[in-house]
Image (cartoon, helix red, strand yellow):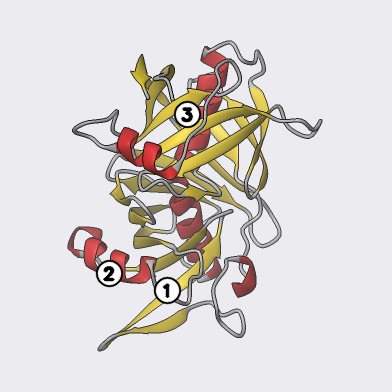
Amino acid sequence: MLAQSIRFTKMHGLGNDFAVFDAINQPLDFNEQLVRQLADRHEGIGFDQLLLVEPHAGDDADFRYRIFNADGSEVEHCGNGARCFARFVYEQGLTQKTRIPVMTESGRIVLELTADGQVTVNMGIPRLEPAEIPFIFQARQMLYTVDLGQDAVQFAAVSMGNPHAVLQVADTQAAPVESLGASLESHPLFPKRVNVGFMQVINPQQIRLRVFERGTGETRACGTGACAAVVAGRLQGLLAEQVQVDLPGGRLQIAWQGEGQPVYMTGPATTVYTGTVTV
């Protein structure tokens, strides 16, 4: 197979970094091995996730939005990536709209570029039933307890189009993010693995959050993780309708009125550079 030079744009949302590829104007064919090579921070481009912009055939969305983790696995959703996706298609002239419907593996979402340079994403209605997360448990509960060897861990389980386990901790800085995150990520009760959030409640309008993402490890920010944490906190009566989420990479604003309603996420998306890579 002949080598191919392909264009990409490096972007980040609060330090959660992406390589974004336009698959509308250039032929692209990614597999797990190639994604892993490109994700390598020493010999490749280096990124947490690879984002792919594809055409969408239906009238219900303008684009198809695909996400690949650094380990090559394809996942359903990424909130920080969604904001970068919106800025990318607008800056690249793929659309002139500032309100952009896109189709993901988990369904349709709407991205909106705001006048102050932020991006607001309608992240959809959170799913709370175990089978929809997916999470192997007989019935829905506010908090679940799972044994991990000699220890038991308690968490809320939420799907924001991708699965999340949210643990409340006294101090995010002292939380065992790497060890406990890795143990829960691949727990057999989560057949598609799980993203693990560590939430510290500062007050009803503010939380601190660290997230161990499946297939990537801890990232500087996780948009779906921020949404899942606010949903979990709201259901436990800990949080208000609008919450500031402070992540290692920066700040997101999350709004959720309650069950049956969509979650709205607002935050920045930054273009770092454009380039080409030979594959």
Quick check: 96 above or below 145?
above
Query: What numbered label is drawn on residue 180?
Result: 2
Gap in angstroms between the C-alphas marked 2 and 1 = 12 Å
Among all residues in the image, which is located at the extreme right?
59
Q: Number of callouts in the render? A: 3
Decide if residue 30 is on the left or right side of residue 210: right
Instruction: Identify residue type, mark 3.
Output: Cys
Front tag of 3 and 1 = 3
Q: Amino acid at mark 2?
A: Leu
Camera-near label (2 vs 1) is 2
User: Which of 55 and 201 lies nearest the eye of the viewer?
Assistant: 55
Q: Nearer the viewer, residue 71 or 113?
A: 71
Q: Is residue 251 left or right of residue 141?
A: left
Q: Which mark is residue 84?
A: 3
The answer to whether marks 3 and 1 mark residues whose Cβ atoms lie closer than 8 Å is no
Q: CA distance from mark 3 to mark 2?
A: 29 Å
Q: Which amino acid is tagged 1?
A: Phe
At a point 66% along the width and 25% down the height, the residue shown is 99
Circle 1 sits in a helix, a strand or a loop, which is it? strand
* Circle 1 residue: 155
**How far apart are labels 3 and 1 at the CA level?**
29 Å
Q: Secondary structure at mark 3?
A: helix
Relative to 260, is 12 above or below?
above
